[in-house]
Image: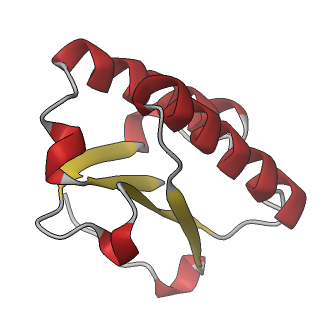
């Protein structure tokens, strides 16, 4: 954790080259490391093609992360701005971004 899932509309996904996808994933990973202080080994980033774009938006981003005292509202606002900037630069679209903190004692994981 954190887990970033980017749901991309079919029309946009077909326009994204593998290089462009990597151009998008790299800054997302860097933001997790530098802003959220996430362990690089635990960052998960998924780019999925949505059959129906959520609420008519070409990109919907869902971020799930462990709730910690240092991940304040200000930090998360700056993090979302960075994600937004990366998507605009790569895809030239505005994304809908949602972040969901997960309490440490409510997480269960395996492998």
> Image quadrant for the C terminus?
bottom left
Would residue 92 be found to the left or right of residue 44 on screen? Answer: right
Q: In this view, does 83 lie above or below 67?
A: above
Choose top left, top right, bottom left or bottom right for residue 13: top left
Residue 92 spot, x, y in % from top left: 47, 32
Q: Is residue 108 above or below residue 95?
A: below
Q: How many marks?
A: 0
Q: In this view, does 33 lie above or below 5?
A: above
Residue placed furthest toward the right:
74
Looking at the picture, tell me which residue is in the foreground, 86 or 106.
Answer: 86
Residue placed furthest toward the bottom:
106
Residue 62 spot, x, y in % from top left: 44, 64
Please give the name of the residue rendered at 41% of the width and 53% of the height, measured from the top-left corner.
Answer: 4
> Image quadrant for the N terminus?
bottom left
Would residue 88 be found to the left or right of residue 67 on screen? Answer: left
Looking at the picture, tell me which residue is in the foreground, 9 or 5.
Answer: 9
Color encoding of the figure = secondary structure
Q: In this view, does 14 lie above or below 55?
A: above
Residue placed furthest toward the top:
19
Please give the name of the residue rendered at 55% of the width and 68% of the height, measured from the top-left corner.
Answer: 98
Looking at the picture, tell me which residue is in the foreground, 61 or 44.
Answer: 61
Would residue 78 be found to the left or right of residue 94 on screen? Answer: right
Please give the name of the residue rendered at 40% of the width and 63% of the height, measured from the top-left corner.
Answer: 57
Choose top left, top right, bottom left or bottom right for residue 77: bottom right
């Amino acid at each position: 954790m954190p887990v970033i899932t980017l749901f991309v509309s079919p029309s946009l996904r077909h326009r994204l080259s593998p290089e462009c996808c990597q151009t998008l994933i790299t800054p997302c990973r860097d933001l997790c490391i530098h802003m959220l202080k996430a362990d690089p080994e635990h960052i998960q980033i998924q780019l999925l093609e949505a059959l129906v774009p959520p609420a008519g938006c070409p990109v919907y981003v869902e971020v799930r992360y462990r709730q910690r005292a240092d991940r304040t509202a200000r930090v998360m606002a700056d993090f979302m701005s960075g994600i937004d900037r990366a998507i605009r630069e790569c895809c030239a679209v505005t994304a809908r971004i949602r972040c969901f903190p997960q309490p440490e004692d409510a997480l269960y994981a395996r492998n």
